[in-house]
Amino acid sequence: MPSEQPAWVLSRRQAIGSRIRAARERANLSQLRLANLVGVDHKTIHRIEYGISDPSLGLLLQIAQALDVPLGDLVQ
């Protein structure tokens, strides 16, 4: 199994993170508040928003629910 992912994967993660950040800001939530709502550390939210972390589907579903947006809007 290759240890590095293709460049397009990082680009997509960053785009998804950017949409999560925008939705969080529209919901007037801090990273800390969103983290509390989904049960993770606020640093995890930061890493997701900046494309550093590779979140699980389950966590993405929780984030979408906490932000009251369809998951498809975040990962399109």
Image (cartoon, grey):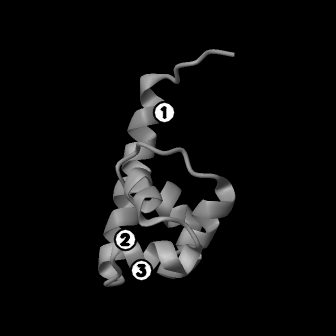
Secondary structure of residue under mark 1: helix
Residue 58 image point, x, y percent: 68, 61
Three-letter code, disc 1: Val
Which residue position is annotated with label 1? 9
Q: Are marks 3 and 2 in contact (CB under 8 Å)?
A: yes
Disc 1 to disc 2, C-alpha distance: 23 Å
Three-letter code, disc 3: Arg
* 17 w.r.t. 34: above or below: above
Which residue position is annotated with label 3? 33
Residue 60 image point, x, y percent: 58, 62
Q: Is residue 7 visible?
A: yes
Q: Is residue 72 left or right of residue 15?
A: right
Three-letter code, disc 2: Gln
Secondary structure of residue under mark 2: helix
Q: Quadrant of residue 39?
A: bottom right
Give the number of the mark in front: 1 or 3: 3
Give the number of the mark in front: 1 or 2: 2
Residue drawn at x 39%, y 74% is 32
From the image, which quarter does the N terminus lie in?
Answer: top right
